[in-house]
Image (spheres, rainbow, N blue to C red):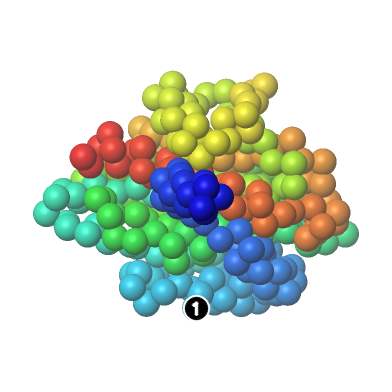
Amino acid sequence: MRKIAFLSLLFILGCSTGDEYDFDGEAALRRVKTLLSHGQRVSGSRELEKAGEYIFSSLPETVKRRIIEFEDMTPEGVRTFRNIEAVIPAADPAVSGGRFIIVSGHYDLKKLEPPMAGANDSGSSAAVLIELARTIKPSRCEIRIVWFDGEECLRRYSENDGLHGSRNYAAGLSADELKNCIALINIDMVGDRDLNYTLSADTSLAMVKTLMKAAEKTGVSDRITQYRGNILDDDRPFRELGVPCVNLIDFDYDAWHTPEDDLSRISAESLAVTGSLVLAVIDELQNASCP
Ligand SMILES: [Zn+2]
């Protein structure tokens, strides 16, 4: 009898602490495997186009989906890029007042010889975004999930090399949208078995506070450290437009841009930690901006 009562208490405690931010890491890991099966997903390749079709077809019909195709100059001439967007509308648009949060990451691979498998960079971010699009229900404000193409540069990051998708998407936001954009949460390399987020040194104090509150709620505060410098990633074009940004990235990854960035290096647990943390950050942002 006592044992049953104890077990029930555990069950109740379990429900009250974790369920709110439940995220299926195993499902995300299966999606990384499928993304890898598409081969060399570099920008402009048939492989990346196929991977993009897979992402698009994995999105539930309850979200508004679109592929945003555009051309941009690269050091090797004009190239075609494709961002993918999934919009989860606010439960009550009258209450949300048009406010929205962007959750983003890239899905292209760096063109390298020997080629990379890209399990962590960028399989992990692309897969976590798919499961987020399938998990998040209409809530207090609109959530836009965006897979950026062309994050990786061909030679060296510059005006015409790298961050193509994020620069194009940011430039497409109207003045009204910029006003209504509560924040952007970017994720990149979030599947490492030994996952520790390295927070870019230029992250604003307000966003650090929001992140730490969310990390406390999901029990992962000890996984967050400050990086020794600034990290250039897809959040940069939005930051330059004044959008509050946080980039969840584990930049201390020794298989970065090598053929060793394969499935053996990532885990379902790390993908679940990231998914839950993103859900908690969204919640914190909504508490502050869409009460
Ligand atoms: Zn990369």
Please state which of residues 123 and 225 is positioned toward the viewer in this rendering.
Answer: 225
Please state which of residues 287 and 8 is positioned toward the viewer in this rendering.
Answer: 8
* Residue found 59% across the figure and 47% down from its top: 273
Label 1 Cα neighbours within 10 Å, binned few <14 / some 14-19 / many ≥20: few
Q: Give how far across and how far down residue 188 sits, in percent.
A: 61, 47
Q: Quadrant of residue 223?
A: top right
Indicate whether 137 appears above or below 98: below
Work out whether residue 43 can be spotted: no
Indicate whether 215 appears above or below 51: above
On the rendered structure, is 240 left or right of 256? left
Residue at far left of view: 94
* Residue found 85% across the figure and 54% down from its top: 260
On the rendered structure, is 270 left or right of 90? right
Residue at far front of view: 1
Helix, strand or loop at mark 1: helix
Work out whether residue 25 can be spotted: yes
Q: Give how far across and how far down residue 76 sits, in percent.
A: 67, 58
Query: Callout 1, which amino acid?
Result: Ser
Q: Give how far across and how far down residue 94 sits, in percent.
A: 11, 54
- According to the picture, the residue beneath numbered tag 1 turns out to be 57
